[in-house]
């Protein structure tokens, strides 16, 4: 997708504050650190204790989960929206209803309770349900920031959020938001074009497969962290629900940040927004979310 043209209009003080919040959401602590707080143990140590073959199970379940979300996006392509209706006030100006983050958190916590009770054996059944619920939440957030979910590109941007969630690897390599986003940009653009022209027939085409492979490679690493956090003996339903709540919150925050940046880009242009984003003090991008 071509960059949105540069705008000479400077960001308002309000929009700069909004952008600073988006940066905190996008570049806050990695998922592993948040999970470690939830379970009271380093996730890296728990990952080392996963049974042989666990990573194959995780990779397979991750791809199946993403495919299910993709099918949900493609099957309703062309319809106005996936979630709730927009709210249009009497003034005639379009306003977008706030996303229902809490509702999706509750639903994902319920699937996490089952996963906590049954462990790795439940993953192939649980993860597609959890991921689909998370995808709907991401779409809800995108809609609240003015994305047109009737468009293939908007829906693939929602799917791409699964490949943007900040990980420990990103922190170690200083992989920021625009680098992670840029790595997916060309694949999203080509897949969007195929979806827009072919619809359901585009499923399985090379461009879409490349995009799904790129997203799955990053998402599966974070699913591994989530599974490791649930691997504590006798974790139980309560802690399983807590782990899933941390998991969805991580991607909800990523979605809030990503679609806020895109909304500002539609107003000011991509170059102006990226320059302003990079100018935000590093201390504003740290901390937990």
Image (cartoon, helix red, strand yellow):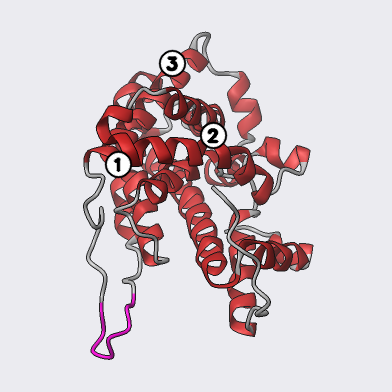
Contact? badges 2 and 1 (CB < 8 Å): no
Q: Specify which label sits upstream in the sequence, 3 or 2.
A: 3
Magenta stretch, main secondary structure, is loop
Q: Which secondary structure, mark 1?
A: helix
Residue range of the region highlighted in magenta in the rendering: 88-95
Q: Position of residue 13 (x, y in %)?
A: 64, 84
Residue receiving disc 2: 222
Residue at (76% x, 44% y) in the render: 174
Residue neighbourhood size for the residue with mark 2, other residues' Cα within 10 Å, grouped as few (<14), some (14–19), many (≥20): many
Mark 3 to mark 2 CA distance (whole Å): 14 Å
Q: Position of residue 227 (x, y in %)?
A: 48, 29
Residue at (33% x, 77% y) in the render: 95
Name the quadrant containing residue 57: top left
Q: Position of residue 99 (x, y in %)?
A: 35, 64
Contact? badges 3 and 2 (CB < 8 Å): no
Residue at (41% x, 24% y) in the render: 63
Contact? badges 1 and 3 (CB < 8 Å): no
Placement of 67 over or under 130, stated as above or below: above
Q: Which secondary structure, mark 3?
A: helix
Residue receiving disc 3: 57
Q: Which secondary structure, mark 2?
A: helix
Q: Nearer the viewer, residue 189 or 244?
A: 189
Residue receiving disc 1: 73
Magenta segment includes 1: no
Q: Is residue 273 left or right of residue 258?
A: right
């Amino acid at each position: 997708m071509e960059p949105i043209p540069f705008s000479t209009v400077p960001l308002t003080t309000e929009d700069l504050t909004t952008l600073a919040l988006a940066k905190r959401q996008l570049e806050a602590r990695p998922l592993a650190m948040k999970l470690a707080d939830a379970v009271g143990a380093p996730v890296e140590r728990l990952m080392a204790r996963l049974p042989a073959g666990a990573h194959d199970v995780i990779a397979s379940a991750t791809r199946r989960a993403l495919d299910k979300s993709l099918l949900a996006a493609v099957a309703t392509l062309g319809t106005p929206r996936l979630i709730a209706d927009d709210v249009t006030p009497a003034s005639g100006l379009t306003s977008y209803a706030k996303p229902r983050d809490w509702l999706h958190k509750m639903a994902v916590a319920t699937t996490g309770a089952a996963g906590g009770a049954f462990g790795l054996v439940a993953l192939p059944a649980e993860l597609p349900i959890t991921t689909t619920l998370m995808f709907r939440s991401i779409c809800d957030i995108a809609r609240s920031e003015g994305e047109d979910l009737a468009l293939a590109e908007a829906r693939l941007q929602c799917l791409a959020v699964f490949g943007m969630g900040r990980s420990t690897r990103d922190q170690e390599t200083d992989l920021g938001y625009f680098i992670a986003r840029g790595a997916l940009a060309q694949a999203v653009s080509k897949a969007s074009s195929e979806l827009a022209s072919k619809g359901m027939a585009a499923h399985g085409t090379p461009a879409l497969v490349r995009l799904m492979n790129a997203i799955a490679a990053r998402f599966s690493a974070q699913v591994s962290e989530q599974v490791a956090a649930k691997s504590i003996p006798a974790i139980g339903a309560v802690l399983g629900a807590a782990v899933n709540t941390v998991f969805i919150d991580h991607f909800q925050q990523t979605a809030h940040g990503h679609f806020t940046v895109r909304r500002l880009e539609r107003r000011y242009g991509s170059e102006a927004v990226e320059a302003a984003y990079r100018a935000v003090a590093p201390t504003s991008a740290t901390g937990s979310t």
